[in-house]
Image (spheres, rainbow, N blue to C red):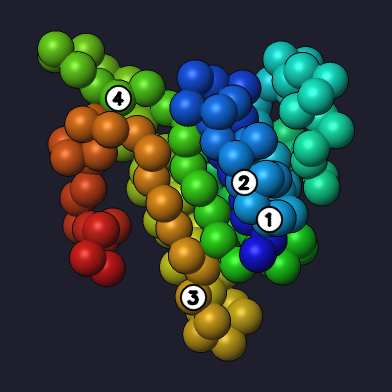
Amino acid sequence: MRVLLTGATGNVGSRLLPSLVAHNHEVILYLRSPSKLSAEAKSCAKAIITGSGTDSDSIKAALLSHNCDAMVNAAGLAPMFGTKGELPAIFAAAMKAAIDAGKERGGKPIRMWFMAGQGIMESPQKPHLMAD
């Protein structure tokens, strides 16, 4: 399976990358700061794309141009204990990108996994509910 992984330089994403590769997935990295990637992470990636986790058009373009079957979002910090983070915007952008990419490629959906923990419970708002 070809997988777009966001947040590969973070705590969760950096652990997901070798696991995805070990399970024979082709991994395309989508991240804000490629300079933070280790040499090992770079060698595991099929491609590396620089972009913002809140830019749904850029995420959609990455999904389509690399013919991704799935996306794992490990980008963003969960808002906890009254703090604000970009996770709600990242969640909405990733969902929009996956929905739009699926429509653009003839209704073939993009599988999505969100690895952001508790903060995700505060994030989904119409029109980007997880049930959608």
Q: Quadrant of the N terminus?
A: bottom right
Neighbour class for label 4 at 10 Å: few (<14), some, many (≥20)? many
The picture places residue 76, in percent across and down from the top left corner, at 43, 27
Mark 1: which amino acid? His
The picture places residue 92, in percent across and down from the top left corner, at 36, 48
Mark 4: which amino acid? Ala
Q: Is residue 105 above or below residue 99?
A: below
Mark 3: which amino acid? Pro
The picture places residue 20, in percent across and down from the top left corner, at 62, 46
Q: Is residue 99 above or below residue 6?
A: below
Per the image, label 4 sits on a secondary structure element best described as loop
- Residue at (60%, 67%) from the top-left corner? 69
Real-space Cα distance between discs 3 and 1? 18 Å
- Residue at (23%, 58%) from the top-left corner? 129
> What number is the disc on residue 20?
2
Identify residue for label 3.
109
